[in-house]
C-alpha cells in the first residue's frame, strides 16, 4: 500500500514541493509553503551534480535531466515535506519519479490535469488536492484574490517586454517562471516585482531589431536569453513561462486552470502561440525541447501548424549553451536579419 | 587576394581568391595546423601564412567548428551557414536549392531560396551522420575513405544507433563473410538514412552536395534515388566553406567601392 498520508490537520508549516505548476492557491490556503522543485534544482549551487547523483542512484543516462534533477533535489536536500506530483498533463516519467520518491519514504500527492480539459474532472482533482493538504474552499478563493493582484503585475511586466520594449527576455522569463510558487514567498515576490517594475518603467526602450518567441518548457540553459540579445535579437514572448503566470485575470479558479494551456496538449498550446505571434509581431520562434522528452515529437506538429521561421534547440544537462547550440542560434538570427 | 579559411574538426581548408576567381587551395589536418602553422598569442592564434600560401592576403575571413572557440589574429569570423551558402551559390550559379554538407563532425542541410538561406537543420548530439563515422568504418574495413565512398550496391543492414557500437556490428558482419563492397555500401546507406529526414524536411528539386563525403558517388546515389532530387556536386566540394569566406570579403569590398 502506497503511503499517501494526508496532511490534513497538520499544524505545522509544511513545505510542499511540486513537479510542475499546480494550483498553488490550494497549497497556500492550507497554510503551507509552495516549493517548485524545478526552480530549486536549476537555481541550486550545482545542478549538474544533482543530475549525476540521480544517475549514480540508477537513473538511465537517456532520461530527461529535469526528472533526474528533481529526484536528487528531493532526496538529497531535504527541501520539502511532501510533493504534489502531476500524473497527467506532464510526462509519464513523473510516474516513475513519484515511485522512486515513495521508495525513499517521500510523501507524494498525485494531481492530474484532465487531457480533454473537462471542467468536472478538474474540479474533482482540485478538491482532492485541497482535502489532501487540508485547505477549505473559502480560504482558496481568498488566496486566489491575493495572487491575482500579483499575477496582474506580472502581466504588466510582460507588456513592458513586448509593447514598451523595456524588459529583457531574461527578466521576462525569470519573473513569469517564478509564478509557479512565487519563489515560496508571495509577499517578498510582490515586493521584488514592484521594485523591478518601478525601475523598468523608467528604462529607455531597447532597440533589438529582431523579435523572437520562445516556446516549450523553460530552458535548462542558463544563458540563452543573454546570448540571443548579444546577437541583436530579443525574446519578447515566453510561452510556457507566461502560462505559469496565468495572465488571463480569470475570476473562476477552475476556469483559470482549465485555460492554462501547458498540460492540455499541443493544439491547445498552439492556439495561444498563434495569437501571440500575431499580437507581438514575432519574426521567428525558438522551440526548446528537452533531450529524451516526448515533446520532441510535437516539434513536427509545431512546424506544420506555424507559418514562421522556427529554430528547434535541444538541451540535456544544466549549464551554459554548448558550442553547437550557439552555432544554431547564431545561424538562425543571421538568417532572419 | 582574399583568404578564406574553414576551421573544421578534421581538416583546415584554406583558399586564396581574387576578382578572377580561385587561385590557391590547401587542406591541412586540423591538429597539424594548430601545431605547425602558427602560434598561440594573447590576441589569439597567429597563422604563419608564408608557409601556407604564396601571397600575403589582403583580408582573412574564417568560419568553421573553431568559430566559437578560437580567434585567428586579424581575421573576421562569419558563421558556417553563411559561408557554405555563399560558397554554394558561387560554385553552382543556382538560386534555389538545398545544400547538403557532410563534414567531419557536422551534417548540415540548408534550404536556399532566391539566393538566401531560408531554413536549415544540423545534426545534434550525435556524430553518427558525419565524415568521422565514415573514417572509423573505413578503418574497420581496412579500406581508404575514397574506396568506401564508391560503394552503393546491395547495402548490408546496419542497425546500431551509435557510431561506436556500429563498429562492433560491422565486425560481426565481416565475421559472417559479407563482402567488403556490401559492407561499405551498408555504411554509406546508414549515413544517408540519418540525413534523409533533414533532406525531406527541407527538400528542393536540386541538392547541392558538399564536404569531403561528396567526393564519392554513394550518398549522392541515394539522394537522387530516394529523395528524387537532382544532385549537383560543385567543382570543389571540400573547400566550399573556405571559398564562401573569401567571397564574403570580396563581395563586401566590391559593394563598398
Image (cartoon, rainbow, N blue to C red):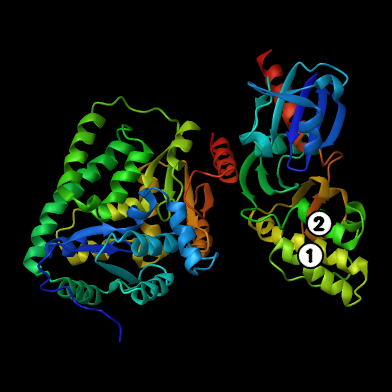
Quadrant location, the C terminus of chain A? top right
Label located before the other in sequence (1 or 2)? 2
B116, B66: nearer the viewer: B66
Question: Which residue is situated farthest in the top direction here?
Answer: B257
Q: Residue at x 76, y 38 (%)?
A: B88
Indicate the position of residue A119 as horizontal and vertical percent values. 23, 73
Q: Locate residue B56: give its quadrant.
A: top right
Callout 1–callout 2 Cβ contact below 8 Å: yes
Callouts 1 and 2 on one subunit: yes
Residue B167, which numbered label?
Answer: 1
Whether residue A232 is visible: no
Subunit ID for the residue under disc 1: B
Classify 10 Å Cα crowding around label 1: few (below 14), some (14-19), many (20 and above): many
Indicate the position of residue B112 as horizontal and vertical percent values. 67, 43
Classify 10 Å Cα crowding around label 2: few (below 14), some (14-19), many (20 and above): some
Q: Residue B37 vs residue A161: left or right?
A: right
Task: Please tell me whether mark 2 sits on a helix, a strand or a loop.
Answer: helix
Q: Residue at x 44, y 44 (%)?
A: A222
Q: CA distance from mark 1 to mark 2?
A: 8 Å
Q: Residue at x 50, y 64 (%)?
A: A55
Indicate the position of residue B217 as horizontal and vertical percent values. 88, 55
In the picture of the structure, the residue carrying the numbered disc 2 is B136
Q: Residue B96 vs residue B209: left or right?
A: left
Residue A323, which numbered label?
Answer: none
Q: Residue B148 vs residue A336: left or right?
A: right
Amino acid at each position: 500500500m502506497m503511503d499517501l498520508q494526508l496532511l490534513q490537520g497538520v499544524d505545522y508549516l509544511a513545505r510542499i514541493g511540486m513537479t510542475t505548476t499546480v494550483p498553488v492557491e490550494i497549497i497556500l490556503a492550507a497554510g503551507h509553503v509552495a516549493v517548485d522543485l524545478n526552480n530549486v534544482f536549476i537555481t541550486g549551487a550545482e545542478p549538474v551534480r544533482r543530475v549525476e547523483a540521480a544517475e549514480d542512484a540508477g537513473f538511465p543516462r537517456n532520461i530527461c535531466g529535469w526528472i533526474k534533477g528533481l529526484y536528487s533535489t528531493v532526496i538529497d536536500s531535504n527541501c520539502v515535506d511532501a510533493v504534489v506530483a502531476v500524473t497527467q498533463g506532464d510526462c509519464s516519467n513523473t510516474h516513475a519519479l513519484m515511485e522512486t520518491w515513495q521508495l525513499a519514504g517521500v510523501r507524494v500527492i498525485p494531481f492530474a490535469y484532465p487531457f480533454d480539459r473537462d471542467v468536472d474532472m478538474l474540479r474533482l482533482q482540485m478538491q482532492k488536492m485541497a482535502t489532501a493538504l487540508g485547505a477549505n474552499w473559502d480560504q482558496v478563493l481568498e488566496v486566489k484574490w491575493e495572487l491575482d493582484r500579483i499575477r496582474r503585475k506580472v502581466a504588466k511586466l510582460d507588456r513592458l517586454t513586448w509593447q514598451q520594449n523595456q524588459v529583457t527576455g531574461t527578466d521576462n522569463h525569470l519573473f513569469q517562471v517564478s509564478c509557479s510558487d512565487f519563489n515560496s514567498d508571495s509577499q517578498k515576490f510582490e515586493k521584488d516585482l514592484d521594485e523591478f517594475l518601478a525601475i523598468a518603467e523608467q528604462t529607455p526602450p531597447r532597440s533589438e531589431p529582431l523579435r523572437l518567441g520562445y516556446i516549450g518548457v523553460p530552458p535548462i540553459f542558463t544563458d540563452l536569453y543573454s546570448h540571443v540579445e548579444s546577437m541583436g535579437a530579443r525574446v519578447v514572448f515566453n510561452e510556457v513561462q507566461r502560462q505559469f503566470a496565468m495572465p488571463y485575470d480569470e475570476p473562476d479558479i477552475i476556469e483559470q486552470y482549465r485555460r492554462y494551456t501547458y498540460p492540455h496538449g499541443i493544439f491547445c498550446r498552439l492556439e495561444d502561440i498563434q495569437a501571440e505571434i500575431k499580437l507581438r509581431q514575432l519574426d521567428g520562434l525558438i522551440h526548446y525541447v528537452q533531450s529524451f522528452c516526448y515533446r520532441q515529437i510535437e516539434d513536427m506538429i509545431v512546424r506544420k501548424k506555424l507559418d514562421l521561421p522556427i529554430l528547434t534547440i535541444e538541451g540535456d544537462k544544466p549549464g551554459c549553451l554548448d558550442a553547437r547550440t550557439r552555432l544554431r542560434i547564431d545561424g538562425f538570427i543571421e538568417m532572419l536579419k | 587576394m582574399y583568404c578564406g579559411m574553414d576551421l573544421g574538426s578534421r581538416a583546415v581548408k584554406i583558399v586564396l581568391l581574387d576578382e578572377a576567381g580561385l587561385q590557391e587551395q590547401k587542406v591541412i589536418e586540423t591538429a597539424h595546423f594548430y601545431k605547425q602553422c602558427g602560434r598561440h598569442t594573447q590576441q589569439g592564434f597567429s597563422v604563419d601564412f608564408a608557409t601556407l600560401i604564396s601571397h600575403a592576403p589582403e583580408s582573412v575571413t574564417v568560419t568553421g567548428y573553431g568559430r566559437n572557440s578560437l580567434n585567428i589574429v586579424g581575421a573576421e569570423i562569419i558563421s558556417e551557414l553563411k559561408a557554405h551558402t555563399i560558397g554554394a551559390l558561387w560554385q553552382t550559379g543556382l538560386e534555389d536549392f538545398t545544400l547538403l554538407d557532410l563534414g567531419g563532425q557536422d551534417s548540415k542541410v540548408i534550404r536556399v531560396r532566391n539566393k538566401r538561406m531560408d531554413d536549415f537543420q544540423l545534426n545534434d548530439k550525435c556524430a553518427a551522420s558525419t565524415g568521422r563515422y565514415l573514417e572509423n568504418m573505413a578503418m574497420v574495413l581496412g579500406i581508404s575513405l575514397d574506396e568506401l565512398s564508391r560503394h552503393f550496391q546491395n547495402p548490408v543492414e546496419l542497425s546500431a544507433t551509435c557510431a561506436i557500437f556500429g563498429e562492433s556490428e560491422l565486425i560481426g558482419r565481416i565475421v559472417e563473410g559479407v563482402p567488403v563492397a556490401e559492407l561499405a555500401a551498408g555504411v554509406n546507406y546508414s549515413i544517408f538514412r540519418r540525413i534523409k529526414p533533414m533532406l525531406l524536411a527541407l527538400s528542393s528539386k536540386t541538392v547541392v552536395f558538399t564536404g569531403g563525403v561528396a567526393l564519392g558517388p554513394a550518398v549522392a546515389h541515394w539522394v537522387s534515388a530516394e529523395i528524387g532530387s537532382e544532385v549537383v556536386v560543385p567543382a570543389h566540394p571540400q573547400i566550399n566553406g573556405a571559398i564562401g569566406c573569401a567571397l564574403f570579403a570580396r563581395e563586401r569590398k566590391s559593394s563598398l567601392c
